[in-house]
Amino acid sequence: MKKILVFALALICLLGITLSLGAAQTATVGITPNKSSTYAGDSVTFTVKVTGVSAAKSIGIIPSYDTSVFELVSGEWLLSGSAMSDFSGGTAAIAYASARGFNENVFKFTLRIKSGAKLGQTAVDAKVNIMNGNETISCNVSAAKVTVACKHSYSAWSNANGSSHTRTCSLCKNVETKNHTFSNACDTSCNDCSYTRVTNHTYSSSWSSDGAQHWHACTGCGDKKDATVHTPGPAATETTDQTCTVCGHVLVSAQGHTHTPSATYTSDETGHWFVCEGCKEPLEKAEHIFSADCDEACDACQYKRTVTHTYGTEWYGDEQSHWHVCSICNSAEASEAHAWDEGTVTKEPTLDFAGERVHKCATCERQKTVELILQSAPTQDPTPAPITQNDGLAWWWLIIVGTAGIALGFAAAFLLFKPKKEAN
């Protein structure tokens, strides 16, 4: 059954049979190649697109091309949901159970360019038959155009005249013409063919040079004339180069200055720096460094700055003086001696004990206590009475008599309390 349907569709396409009385629809069919230029042995794929069809049940397509140029490789429907589709013998057919619209790519086929195919542009067309039941839909088909190019195999360049040379393709006999080319303005031989010409050097009046010599160079090709070794000038210094006295080429560059920093800082109110002992250039300039907001001396260079301290109202002091302290850096202002008042007696003196008087500083209210001695107390003769010889003998008699009395006392006690012996 399938073969019969394919045969029927193919027959309709080939013979252009129209089974309806009139076409109500007109289809636009475009054929597009994937490349516009190709070579023998290459393949080209063509896509068939159908637009403008609102309802149709079948499509038949037969690619049309010059068989001396192309040979068919393959074909493939790009649609889905069909009741039947086929491509065989160069004829493609597809059918649906119910009508549907077509505004899309429907089919593609691939052709290969035959070996020895004629060169130039050739058309690829297709016979397209679209039907909706018994209605044949009119089709306007736009053919594709492909150029078959030659993979040229050219001969060597051959001199044609004083300005150009030619070469010929051994395959298609195409002749190419090109102007002579030279490496530079003084080159006498063409880079591509055997043509030769006569040239003359044009030397610059300025010197060219390298590390060894100087010369006059041709402006066209760089050819050297008058090449000579350099003539050295005065030796290089810290600031000047040694150059050739002829061409000015630098033989030895200026050696440059090596700074020798001073041992101590130079400073001003903005910062401090060392000074090069040779050229006096400032080196390593930096801002001053202070340990605190009220620090007067820079930690690095000892530069002195003027500092205004912010002293508090609280008094600090010792036995001799008092002062205020800076609220930022805790440094003390210049001290001043206490201003003691006349004092207040807090303890009256007696013959046995000293008294006390308390004085207060009129500025910082610090207090001190002073001992008071009773000035009206009687004084004693500090010189003791001398001891005479009789006074010394009296003391010895007292000692002797006292000792004898004690001894007699112990003897009496012994006799009184001595135990008696019992009679036998």
Image (cartoon, rainbow, N blue to C red):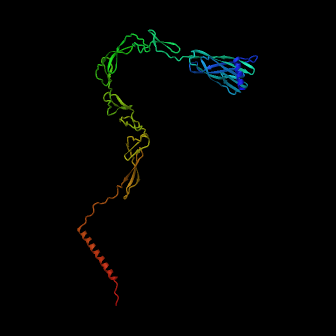
Q: Looking at this rendering, what residue extends furthest in the right direction? A: 21
Q: Is residue 367 above or below residue 266?
A: below
Q: Answer with the quarter of the image where residue 376 lies.
A: bottom left
At 32% from the left and 81% from the top, the residue drawn is: 414
Count the numbered circles shown.
0
The N terminus: image quadrant:
top right
Q: Nearer the viewer, residue 56 or 297?
A: 56
Task: Give the x, y percent position of residue 404.
Answer: 28, 76
Q: Looking at this rendering, what residue extends furthest in the left direction? A: 389
Task: Give the x, y percent position of residue 203.
Answer: 36, 12
Q: Nearer the viewer, residue 382 or 50?
A: 50
At 33% from the left and 16% from the top, the residue drawn is: 215
Left or right relative to 405: residue 39:
right
Q: Is residue 62 above or below residue 350?
A: above
Q: Nearer the viewer, residue 240 or 389?
A: 240
| Residue 39 in view of the camera | no
Q: Looking at this rendering, what residue extends furthest in the top direction? A: 161
